Image: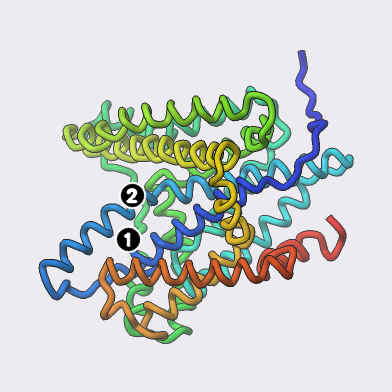
Amino acid sequence: MKYTYAPSDKPNTRIDVADILRGIAIAGIILIHFIEQLNFYMFPEPTSEFWAAANKIVWDSTFFLLAGKMYAIFAMLFGLSFYIQHDNQAQKGIDFRPRFLWRMVLLMLFGLFDLLFYNGDILFLYAVCGVLIIPVIRASDKVIKALIILMLLQPVELVYFIIGLINPDTQPLYLGSNSYFGDIIAAQSAGTILDVAVAGIKNGLPVNFTWAIENGRMTQTILFFLIGIMLGRKRLFYNEGDNLKTWKKVLVGSVIAFAVLLPLYLFVPKAIEIRCVSNSLNVALNMWKNLAMMLFIVSGVTLLYYNTSAKSWLIKIAPYGKMSLTNYLTQSIFGAMIFYNWGFGLFRYCGHTASFFLGVAFIIIQFIFCTWWMKHHKRGPFEQLWCWATWFGKKN
């Protein structure tokens, strides 16, 4: 039987738990960026063994808990939002795809603005991946599930894995991402704000896209977008039907999967001497274990929100999540001001621990501002600008 697209017959009301998860994700992303000193990595030598140990503990634990998981949640919610926007318009008989394409062009512009301050921008990459998933938003569940499986297999890494088995002398995929950092680091360490902006615009996109392809982030981002679309179609973030039972199964399954994948990730790639095979396995296993932890966080927060009294304090995170674009862009602006030479130049004095706590302090300030702002406005400043530009002032 031929598949014919049809919108859902249920309203897509605002999902508070999605805003909460988005807030958790953006806070985690900002913490990672601060401990990295916004892609600078020029840390002073520890002044004692105590601070050397503290720096290692803070660095290792932050990356173990947050790296690869927070961006995955953020990307998954991006796909969920696309589904909701598209379905809301489809229920009115409107094809949202051309408008979403324009929305992605606008996101690219936000990304270019971000590159003026921070060369590690993800907005432009998200916009490109968003364009790539437009053709499948009306595809059948079977097609989307097939694409999810394909992306789960990490197709680029799979190809290099096979090539490495056939020809062990094959080198891992490398597109020259490290070659772009010279100008960037020079501008960050000794340049003016104009130098940083020029280096970011000149080198930011090449370094981000080459690194994303080398490390599987392109296909991973598309994967999480597609997962978000499927979660939206199944309405799993609403407390209806057997959804909570499903999330309990996801919670248990994610714990088991992580327990299996973590030792595989830690030991298997290191035991393989063929570099191309080892690198491909390392990228794939890292993504799979991060996906397991991401699902643990998402299912855990969802169950806490709907099943326990924790809802009353979790909901306080929602305003922060509703302003994720504003929070992301302001962390780039103020983070660059804090660490780079053109601002306070704190890269000269802050190790991992100090950078981490600067990130915590910055998130607290953002949280207070977001709580106040959302009491008086429907959207954050940059969210409102994006909405207005998307709809050209029309009521959406």
Q: Amino acid at mark 1?
A: Asn
Which type of secondary structure does the marked residue at label 2 adopt?
A: loop
Q: Amino acid at mark 2?
A: Tyr
138 and 347: which is toward the camera: 347
Which type of secondary structure does the marked residue at label 1 adopt?
A: helix
- The quadrant where residue 376 appears: bottom right
The residue under label 1 is 178
225 and 370: which is toward the camera: 370
Decide if residue 181 is in sight here. no
The reply to whether discs 1 and 2 touch (Cβ–Cβ < 8 Å) is no
* Image disc number at residue 299: none
Q: Residue at x 60, y 38 (%)?
A: 306
Circle 1 Cα neighbour tier, 10 Å, few/some/many (<14 / 14–19 / ≥20): few
> From the image, which quarter does the C terminus lie in?
bottom right
* Image disc number at residue 174: 2
Figure check: 134 above or below 122: above
Left or right: residue 154 versus residue 394 is left
- Give the residue at the far front of this rendering: 309
Figure check: 270 above or below 48: above
- Give the residue at the far top of this rendering: 1
Q: CA distance from mark 1 to mark 2?
A: 9 Å
